[in-house]
Amino acid sequence: MKYLTATICLTLAVLLGSAGEVWSADFQKGVAAYQSGDYTTALREWKPLAEQGLASAQYNLGSLYLQGKGVPQDDKTAVKWFRLAVEQGDADAQYNLGFMYRNGYGVPQNDETAVKWYRLSAEQGNSTAQYNLGVMYESGRGVRQDDKTAVKWYRLAAEQGNADAQYNLGNLSYFGRGVPQDNVYAYMWWNIAASSGDKDAVNNRDIVAGKMTPADISTAQKLARECVRKKYKGC
């Protein structure tokens, strides 16, 4: 099983109207500054927008505090800004708030609350949240352990190209958890994850290949190609 950590996700807002155009210009200045490593300028551009209620700026400001970039690292202040963005339904903020509860950063550790925020973000299509929600179901943290539900969320994340979800689907196929045991599909998912540079997937794929016939390996490779071609739908 693999786990992810929270990372900053710069959301480029689409703002309408004259006020929105000003917000967008300042927001983009913050994005450019962040990408160049000038976190102090990013903070200066985003903070007024966050205080005026721009959810994407609130989220990014929280991420700066979470990572200690341009400001002293401060989990509680990160949580404050994530909560403000969450009140506006920001999926990235929902995911990061779940991460904070999952790890007890700036808030009391609480797996059930982590699942709540992961789920809200996952339902909006956030692949990282979908993956982590799958992990929570597979491990039985904050929810009743349920491999089939874990597979559901891993599949949704895998369809968006999440290599860790693809890796875990390979594991579940190999051990027959939540899905029928099937070395061909285990190989397929590990082969797809390996194409994204996942070294563990390469290792597992090569191990299971030793238990398969050449025909089965060929079938698994064909399935992997078809799965990628179809953008993972129906895999």
Image: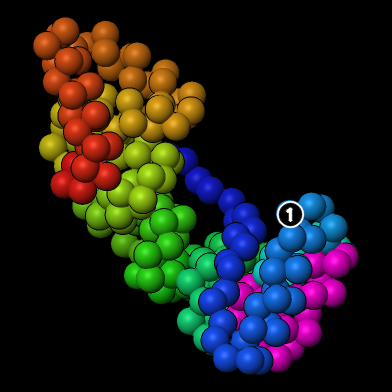
- At 13% from the left and 37% from the top, the residue drawn is 180
For label 1, the residue is: 35
Dominant SS type (magenta):
helix
Residue 115: % across, % down? 43, 67
Residue 10: % across, % down? 62, 62
Colour scheme employed for the rendering of this structure: rainbow
- Image quadrant holding the N terminus, namely top left
Q: Which residues are magenta?
A: 40-59
- At 78% from the left and 84% from the top, the residue drawn is 48
- At 22% from the left and 21% from the top, the residue drawn is 221
- Image quadrant holding the C terminus, namely top left
Q: Quadrant of residue 45?
A: bottom right
- Seen from the viewer's position, the closer of residues 118 and 146 is 118
In the image, taking residue 226 as reference, residue 165 lies left or right, namely right
The kind of residue tagged 1 is Gln
Residue 31: % across, % down? 71, 64
Residue 20: % across, % down? 62, 87
User: Magenta includes 49?
Assistant: yes
Numbered disc 1: secondary structure: helix
Residue 100 seen from this side: yes
- At 48% from the left and 81% from the top, the residue drawn is 89
